[in-house]
């Protein structure tokens, strides 16, 4: 009886208070979702998972509130100044201010910034020193309550400069550094370098971490364990000195567009229940790209949970479940996950049971009928499909394709093609390039025959009156950056023509409203009228922008099949029927 009446042990604490980070465990936060999952599954919260979730939550916050915690107003103003001072010169130049002004408000122009500088620049050197900046901002800050002041500082810290406004390689690289420095610490640590080295060719976190360690040792000249902005800029200037200004700018644009985030739990010793506990939080994060559960004890049932939570994730590119006891009962779930997640292009499964040839214990001894081999083949097929999806097979599909985003997503394959047909100098004539597109399209499976046929070398090289050349340096050859820009530009024409066909009735109404009683209109007048309509209405209603529209609806519509202007000349007026016939003929 005494034994029976003994006090039961207290309930086990699965989420110790010491693992909760103040400010980052609020309702519906990543950590709160993880903690709730741990409680539900009876799993102790893992410190490494918490660390990675807190770091990620800070990066996902719309405004970097963690960067100003405990700061005075003076310290916040100095932080904002340092954020805008890209080159670390101690002054704010016109390009720096223009770049950040556009980041805060895209309609800001040079005139606004010059007026700002004129007001703040007391010594007339066309730059804003730290003292001038602080003197100008103090009266403004004094008129704001704390909440308004902090919001202004946070919006400045969250702004990203437009590198088109930056005049030299140093300032462009400084902007790239700020983009890569995701935690805003002013230096690149190993976690940030890992993301940099995880490219499309080899997205393995373990390999990326080894590369990051090597590069950290090379870049970190003062041996403090991190890479400063000065160290990064100096190294990148040296490594990319061979690039033309055009290719260098394109390379910086590419790095600025890259967004990766890696969850690496390979050293967290999670176990199957620990992996399952982390999945709801990962599912809540809709923008991470890589996750590794290597050696975490993932079993068949855990693989099913991974598929359940991550299937259809919009940005997941890479999954590592290698060195786990997954047999044929689990690989089918991995195949389903890949099939339902088009962005998932790489899955590492080496060291799993189904890859070793002894996990299928069925009585069927025919190796070709092995269940695990069949499911593994299904997984491999799904990955192959995601890596090389079918190219657009019709003009409608091509018009709907975001070629700029497509080229960025598939840049490894596109660059490989370009390299195959380019000369030793890395450039190619457009005639040769178009021939290469047609002859190799079935091999690299990136662009359809519709786009290759639509590209016009005469337009790309600016031999058509009124069309700007893509060959910016005028050497008669295209670099990769020039080639990519030309494809984006030419595809805009497909987009506009397809949209005009779809909106034929609305376009006809605009035509006759502008033409009046005469019923005839020049292409230039029609373009001006359509621009007015686009300004009044949302561009997404028509499906193209003003710039895209003017690349099609212009005086070039009056060129005949021979490339010569018709007898009426380039400024002649057309009836609706004549105009639409010419527009349709462009496709």
Image (cartoon, helix red, strand yellow):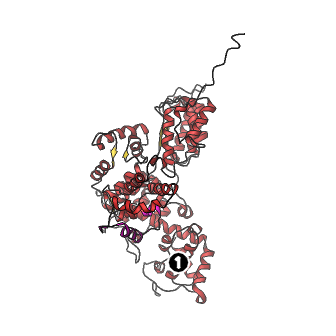
Residue 531 drawn at (x, y percent):
53, 75
**Residue 425, quarter of picture:** bottom left
Q: Which residue is mark 1?
A: 582
- Between 205 and 230, the one nearer to me in the picture: 230
Q: Which region is colored magenta? A: 101-129
Tell me the SS state at disc 1: helix
Label 1 Cα crowd, 10 Å radius (few <14 / some 14-19 / many 20+): some
* Residue at x-position 35% and y-position 54%: 174
Residue 418 higher or lower than 48, as above or below: below
- Between 282 and 128, the one nearer to me in the picture: 128
Q: Residue furthest right?
A: 1
User: Looking at the image, can residue 369 be seen?
Assistant: no
- Between 393 and 105, the one nearer to me in the picture: 105
Q: Residue furthest bottom?
A: 518
User: Looking at the image, can residue 86 be seen?
Assistant: yes
Residue 403 drawn at (x, y percent):
48, 60
Residue 108: in magenta span: yes
Left or right: residue 455 compared with residue 530: left
């Amino acid at each position: 009886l005494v034994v029976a009446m003994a006090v039961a042990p207290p309930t086990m604490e699965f989420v110790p208070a010491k693992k909760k980070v103040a400010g980052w465990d609020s309702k519906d936060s990543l950590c709160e979702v993880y903690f709730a999952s741990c409680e539900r599954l009876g799993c102790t919260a893992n410190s490494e998972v918490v660390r990675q979730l807190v770091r990620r939550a800070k990066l996902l916050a719309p405004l970097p509130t963690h960067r100003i915690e405990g700061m005075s107003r003076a310290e916040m103003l100095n932080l904002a100044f340092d954020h805008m001072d890209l080159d670390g010169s101690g002054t704010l130049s016109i390009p720096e201010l223009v770049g950040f002004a556009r980041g805060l408000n895209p309609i800001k122009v040079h005139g606004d910034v010059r007026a700002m500088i004129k007001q703040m620049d007391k010594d007339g050197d066309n730059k804003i020193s730290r003292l001038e900046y602080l003197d100008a901002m103090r009266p403004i800050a004094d008129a704001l309550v704390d909440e308004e002041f902090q919001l202004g500082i946070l919006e400045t810290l969250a702004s990203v400069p437009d590198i088109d406004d930056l005049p030299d390689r140093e300032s462009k690289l400084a902007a790239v550094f700020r983009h890569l420095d995701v935690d805003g610490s002013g230096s690149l640590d190993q976690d940030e370098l890992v993301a940099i080295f995880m490219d499309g060719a080899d997205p393995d976190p373990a390999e990326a971490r080894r590369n990051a360690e090597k590069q950290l040792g090379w870049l970190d000249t003062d041996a403090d364990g991190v890479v400063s902005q000065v160290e990064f800029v100096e190294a990148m200037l040296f490594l990319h000195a061979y690039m033309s200004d055009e290719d260098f700018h394109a390379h910086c644009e590419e790095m600025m567009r890259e967004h990766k985030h890696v969850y690496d739990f390979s050293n967290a010793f999670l176990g199957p229940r620990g992996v399952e506990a982390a999945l709801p939080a990962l599912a809540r994060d809709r923008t991470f790209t890589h996750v590794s559960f290597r050696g975490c004890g993932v079993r068949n049932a855990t693989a099913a949970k991974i598929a359940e939570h991550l299937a259809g994730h919009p940005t997941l590119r890479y999954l590592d479940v290698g060195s786990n006891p997954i047999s044929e009962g689990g690989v089918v779930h991995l195949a389903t996950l890949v099939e339902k997640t088009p962005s998932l292009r790489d899955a590492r499964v080496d060291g799993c049971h189904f890859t070793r040839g002894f996990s299928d214990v069925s009585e069927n001894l025919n190796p070709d009928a092995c269940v695990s081999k069949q499911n593994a083949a299904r997984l491999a097929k799904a990955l192959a499909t995601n890596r090389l999806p079918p190219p657009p097979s019709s003009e409608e599909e091509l018009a709907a394709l975001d070629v700029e985003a497509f080229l960025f997503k598939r840049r490894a394959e596109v660059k490989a093609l370009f390299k195959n047909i380019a000369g030793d100098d890395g450039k190619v004539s457009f005639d040769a390039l178009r021939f290469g597109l047609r002859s190799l399209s079935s091999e690299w499976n990136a662009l359809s025959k519709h786009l290759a046929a639509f590209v016009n070398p005469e337009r790309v090289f600016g031999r058509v009156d009124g069309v700007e050349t893509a060959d910016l340096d005028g050497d008669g050859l295209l670099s990769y950056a020039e080639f990519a820009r030309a494809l984006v530009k030419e595809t805009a024409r497909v987009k506009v023509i397809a949209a005009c066909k779809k909106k034929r009735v609305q376009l006809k109404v605009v035509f006759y409203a502008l033409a009046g009683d005469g019923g005839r209109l020049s292409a230039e007048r029609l373009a001006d009228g359509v621009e007015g309509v686009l300004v009044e209405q949302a561009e997404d209603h028509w499906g193209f922008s003003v710039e895209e529209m003017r690349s099609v609806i212009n005086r070039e519509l009056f060129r005949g099949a021979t490339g010569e202007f018709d007898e009426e000349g380039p400024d002649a007026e057309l009836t609706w029927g004549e105009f639409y016939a010419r527009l349709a003929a462009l496709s």
